[in-house]
């Protein structure tokens, strides 16, 4: 039981890079301001790299603003491999991402420690005339008893018109709610928005002034097609965001998942509100209702708050209380979490993250504590 608990904890707590909603404090309300993916996460665009260097890192500040077109300079510090390849790649943009980490889990009866390389991915993108081709390939963290394998978490082709209409097809994580950088956050892990919950599908989006609408449909999760494990079933999601001010956003979401051989039909609906009362503070709160049918039916509520404060340029401190109710379902537990995090971005190509989680299973009165230290290298 002790070994099983530790193994499950490792699989549960490992996190991959993603978008950072805390940058709402810097007046960035949309993931696509810095990322190729319209739902956030993954490789930064040249503009996103330059922004990370000049506006977000501790030592990258400059007395003057960058000139127009500076993000296209392939020789700057923010460029791939510190600009070692110059413009040899032409229109192809590459990124190399690694995350060596140390994990310590404390639970009733003992502790578990492990050093691990959470991910090592090569990501590439090409953009031309409104079209974007994007793909990743890398090492998947090995679970206990399984060999390491290589995987492409995302690969898709998208088109974005000048009037705001967009379409995307391939493997991607569908838009829903707020994409917190920690994929184990309750509003991600328990709503099938974890790091392996991408779908093969079609996504349509429309930007209308301060609002953004995204709708996706899919025949099922991407991993289900690879493993043929009975999880294939129609999935549809919708997300609507309106930017009330440069530092205030409201998000509404809905999701539907048809029954599969292993899971009953389910759906979710939720809302999120983000605001930045000061240039160094951002507050996001998301609440979702999750409904399943059949014998495990009942409403389950999930809520997450993430309050971030930039204590010093490039040093962000986060406080995140989280709740998942049992929803009256037999065998389901009520969970409570308090997460504390320090995210330090000293330079363009690396940042250090230290996270502490205190999880309480209210149904069985069990506590666990997790300390996760990560060095994020983005070359």
Image (cartoon, grey):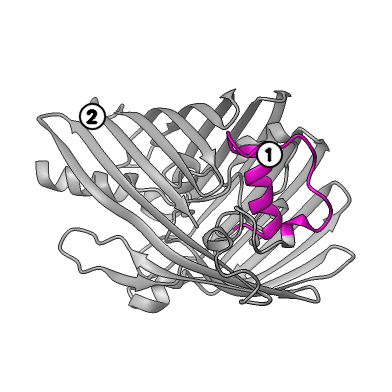
Q: Range of the magenta residues?
A: 44-71
**Residue in the picture at 65% in, 48% down:** 253
Q: Are marks 2 and 1 in contact (CB under 8 Å)?
A: no
Query: How far across and down, in percent of the image, does residue 298 sit?
Result: 45, 43
Q: CA distance from mark 2 to mark 1?
A: 46 Å
Mark 2 nearby-residue class (10 Å; few <14, some 14–19, many ≥20): few
Identified at 25% across, 62% down, the residue is: 142
Q: Nearer the viewer, residue 193 or 180?
A: 180
Instruction: Give the label, 2 or 1, closer to the camera.
Output: 1
In the depicted structure, whether residue 183 falls above or below residue 136: above
> Is 346 or 165 nearer to us in this picture?
346
Mark carried by residue 40: none
Q: Is residue 346 above or below residue 204?
A: above
Label placed on residue 55: 1
The residue depicted at 31 percent of the width and 45 percent of the height is: 101
Quick check: is 59 in the magenta stretch? yes
- Residue 364 disc label: 2
Can residue 126 be seen in this snapshot? yes
Mark 1 falls on what kind of element? helix
Question: How many numbered marks have been drawn onto this rendered protein structure?
Answer: 2
Residue 216, position in %: x, y?
A: 65, 65
Is disc 1 surrounded by few (<14), some (14 to 19) or many (20+) residues within 10 Å?
some
Specify whether 112 is left or right of 78: left
């Amino acid at each position: 039981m002790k070994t099983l608990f530790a193994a499950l904890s490792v699989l549960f707590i490992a996190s991959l890079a993603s978008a950072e909603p805390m940058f709402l404090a810097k007046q960035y309300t949309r993931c696509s301001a810095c990322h190729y993916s319209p739902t956030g996460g993954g490789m930064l665009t040249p503009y996103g790299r330059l922004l990370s260097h000049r506006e977000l890192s501790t030592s990258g500040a400059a007395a003057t603003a960058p000139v127009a077109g500076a993000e296209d300079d392939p020789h700057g510090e923010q460029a791939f491999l510190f600009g070692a390849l110059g413009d040899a790649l032409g229109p192809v943009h590459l990124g190399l991402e690694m995350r060596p980490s140390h994990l310590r889990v404390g639970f009733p009866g003992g502790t578990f420690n492990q050093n691990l390389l959470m991910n090592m991915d090569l990501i590439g993108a090409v953009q031309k005339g409104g079209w974007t081709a994007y793909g990743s390939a890398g090492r998947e963290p090995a679970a206990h008893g399984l060999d390491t394998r290589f995987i492409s978490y995302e690969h898709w082709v998208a088109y974005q018109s000048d009037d705001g209409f967009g379409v995307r097809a391939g493997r991607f994580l569908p838009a829903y709610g707020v994409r917190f950088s920690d994929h184990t956050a309750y509003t991600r892990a328990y709503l099938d928005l974890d790091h392996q919950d991408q779908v093969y599908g079609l996504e349509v989006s429309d930007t209308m002034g301060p609002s953004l609408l995204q709708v996706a449909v899919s025949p099922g999760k991407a991993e289900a097609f690879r493993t043929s494990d009975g999880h294939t079933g129609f999935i549809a999601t919708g997300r609507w965001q309106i930017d009330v001010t440069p530092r205030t956003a409201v998000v509404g979401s809905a999701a539907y998942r048809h029954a599969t051989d292993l899971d009953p039909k389910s759906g979710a609906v939720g809302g999120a509100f983000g605001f930045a009362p000061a240039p160094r503070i951002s507050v996001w709160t998301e609440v979702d209702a999750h409904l399943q049918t059949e014998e495990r039916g009942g409403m389950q509520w999930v809520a997450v708050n993430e309050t971030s404060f930039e204590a010093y340029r490039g040093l962000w401190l986060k406080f995140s209380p989280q709740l998942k109710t049992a929803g009256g379902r037999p065998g389901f537990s009520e969970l409570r979490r308090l997460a504390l995090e320090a995210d330090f971005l000293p330079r363009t190509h690396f940042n250090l993250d230290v996270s502490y989680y205190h999880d309480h299973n209210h149904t069985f009165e069990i506590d666990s504590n997790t300390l996760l230290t990560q060095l994020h290298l983005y070359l």
